[in-house]
Image (cartoon, rainbow, N blue to C red):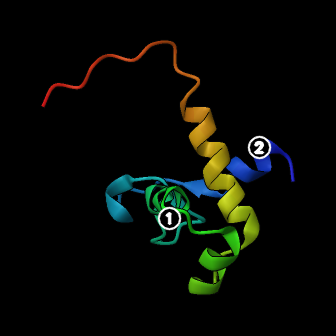
Amino acid sequence: MDKQDLLDRITSNPEICHGKPTIRGTRYMVQSILEYLASGMSHDEILLDFDDLEDDDLKACLTFAAKMTEIKSISPLVA
């Protein structure tokens, strides 16, 4: 599956999770999947916990995150 096919799995709908990026129109937010991966969970562990997700969904989340880092500059966030 190429990058665009993976990115097509990431959707945003104002009616689902307040418009945050999700996987295939489900309520699985990209942010949550990335947090699971960052915590040390393996692809297999996530797929076992969420049996309706596919390996390509996890790859799509990583591809989406990589795409988001292609911005030109970052400004400090103000609390």
Q: Which mark is residue 25?
A: none
- Name the quadrant containing residue 74: top left
Helix, strand or loop under label 1: helix
What is the three-letter code of the residue carrying label 2? Gln
Residue ID at (57%, 85%): 49
* In front of the other: 29 or 25: 29
Circle nearer the N terminus (1, 2): 2
Q: Residue furthest right?
A: 1
Write down the residue under mark 1: 36
> What's the CA distance linking mark 1 and mark 2?
23 Å
Helix, strand or loop under label 2: helix
- Above or below: residue 67 compared with residue 2: above
Label 1 with label 2: CB-CB less than 8 Å:
no
- Above or below: residue 26 compared with residue 58: below
> In the shown orientation, is residue 29 left or right of residue 58?
left
Residue ID at (32%, 16%): 75
- From the image, which quarter does the N terminus lie in? bottom right
Write down the residue under mark 2: 4
What is the three-letter code of the residue carrying label 1? Tyr
Residue ID at (44%, 62%): 32
